[in-house]
Amino acid sequence: MNKQILKSTLIAAAGLLFANSAMAAGTDTATFQVTATVADSCLVSATPLAFGAYDPNAATDNEATSTITATCTEGTDYTLALDFGSNGGSATDTTRAMLGGGNYLDYELYSDSSHATDWNATTTVASTAVAGANTHTVYGQILAGRYVPAASYTDTITVTIVY
């Protein structure tokens, strides 16, 4: 057999082999679902409310703020409530008290800068979460003229988020 014929025959056979392989190979596709369930969820945190030095002889009230941060699933409806603290207050008496040296220094907390709305366990702040941190300001006030003994006064407020 001639080398040229042999070479042509081998090339033709290889071509047929590849052609048959390509014809025999097939493709197919499938799909699958990816799912997740996102539940309403919230975390709450708060910064300290520090009145600093209080002078009962000052002509103006002593004011300070705290920031409550609610980080919730976007679109979650929630309410924030503040308890009456460790030292007093009730549903009928919204004045809270800090304790120092066995004595009490009254103060109040509000949800607005004009101090028109007491913020307590029965008067809550409602909101719907947007993406990221949702901040709320607590406005604290000690009225001028509260004559108490010199001491360091403290109280602890618990923030409750309901969603």
Image (spheres, grey):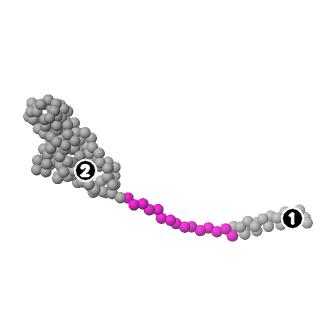
Magenta-drawn stretch contains 36: yes
The quadrant of the rendering that contains the C terminus is bottom left
Q: Residue at x 20, y 37 (%)?
A: 154
Tell me if mark 2 has few (under 14), some (14-19) or many (20+) residues whose alpha carbon lies within 10 angstroms of its own: some
Describe the element under mark 2 as helix, strand or loop: strand
The amino acid pointed to by label 1 is Leu
Residue type, numbered disc 2:
Thr
**Residue farthest along the right direction in this orientation:** 1
Count of numbered labels shown in the rendering? 2
Q: Residue 119: horizontal and vertical position, in percent?
A: 17, 48
Few, some or many residues within 10 Å of mark 1 (<14, 14–19, 20+): few
Q: Name the residue under label 2.
A: 160
Residue 13, percent from left and from top = 79, 67
Identified at 75% across, 67% down, the residue is 17
Which residue shows up at 47% across the image and 62% down it? 34
Earlier-in-chain disc, 1 versus 2: 1
- Name the main secondary structure of what is drawn in magenta: loop
Give the quarter of the image for residue 102: top left
Q: Find residue 7 and report its image quarter.
A: bottom right
Q: Is residue 37 left or right of residue 30?
A: left
| Residue 102 visible in the snapshot | yes
Q: Quadrant of residue 15?
A: bottom right
> Residue 100: x percent and y percent?
16, 34
Q: Measuring from the top left, give residue 130's x and y in whole percent.
A: 31, 53
Residue at the front extreme of this rendering: 102
- Toward the viewer: 28 or 124? 124
Question: Mark 1 and mark 2: span between their CA atoms?
Answer: 90 Å
As rendered, which of 45 and 149 lies closer to the eye? 149
Residue interval drawn in magenta: 23-38
Task: Describe the element under mark 1 as helix, strand or loop.
Answer: helix
Q: In this view, does 152 lie above or below 77?
A: above
